[in-house]
Image: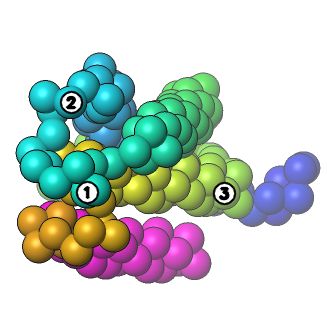
Amino acid sequence: MNADGGETSRFGTTIHITALDGIVNVNSLFTLAVFIGLAWQPTDPSNSLVSDPKCVAGPKIAEDLICFHVYSFSSFLFSSLVALSLKQAIRIAKTSCETRRLMIFTFDMCHINKTALRTGYLISAVGSVCGCGFLMMALVNVAQIKLGTLSCGSSHTYGAVVPLLTFVPLGLLTYVFFVLFAFTR
């Protein structure tokens, strides 16, 4: 145990920095998708493929689209900032590192507060999961604006939304499972 009550142990610092780089890179791609989505004008009537005026998405769906994009952006930005903060903390801790060579690989082993690192990973993962959820909801609204509202029962709208609402949550559940698994190890 260290002075602040957390458990201190030796971790493979290079592995942790690589994992944090992965979080930041994926969040950056999603943030780019959100910016592209925000640049699109959802209320432009030429952007819709709907011919039935009863199935045209109303202003509430367009407002929700913008809100979900902003929520998604803020979640991904939060997650990336936490991951970058963890990377910086690891780099600062590298002053007490020792380098070990294993075959052709070199690993830096540093004293890092394991509890703080795990908590930071968990907080960053929560931000990424929330960002994905909000981005998924924004895409449901894009499908409704482009293909017609869900209440109209368009097969094209359901064909776009059902796989989205099936595969994204399954992927997120898998991600959450492995994050929690790594959190307990």
The residue lying at 26 percent from left, 68 percent from top is 152
Residue drawn at the location 88% of the way across and 58% of the way down = 5
User: Any magenta on residue 13?
Assistant: no
Mark 2 and mark 1 lie on one chain; the one further toward the N terminus is 2
C-alpha span from label 1 to label 3:
46 Å
Residue 178 covered by magenta stretch: yes
**Disc on res. 45:** 2
Q: Disc 2 marks which amino acid? A: Pro
Q: Is residue 119 left or right of residue 133?
A: right
Number of other residues with Cα within 10 Å of mark 2, as a class: few under 14, some 14 to 19, many 20 or more: few
Q: Which mark is residue 55?
A: 1
How far apart marks 2 and 3 lie (CA) works out to 47 Å
Cα separation, mark 2 vs mark 1, equals 13 Å
Which is more foreground, mark 1 or mark 3?
1
Residue type at mark 1: give it. Cys
Residue 125 x %, y %: 50, 56
Snapshot quadrant of residue 126: bottom right
Q: Which residues are magenta?
A: 160-185
Whether residue 33 is visible, yes or no, is yes
Sequence order check, earlier mark of 2 and 3: 2
Residue receiving disc 3: 119
Tell whether label 1 touches label 2 (CB within 8 Å).
no
Q: In the picture shown, does residue 110 fall above or below 32? A: below
Q: In the image, which disc is placed on residue 146?
A: none
Q: Relative to 49, say whether 166 is above or below.
A: below
Residue 40 falls in image quadrant:
top left
- As drawn, is 21 to the left or to the right of 11? left
Q: Earlier in the sequence, mark 1 or mark 3?
A: 1
- In the rendered image, residue 134, in percent from the top left (x then y), is placed at 45, 52
Please state which of residues 74 and 121 is positioned toward the viewer in this rendering. 74
Depth check, front residue: 42 or 174: 42
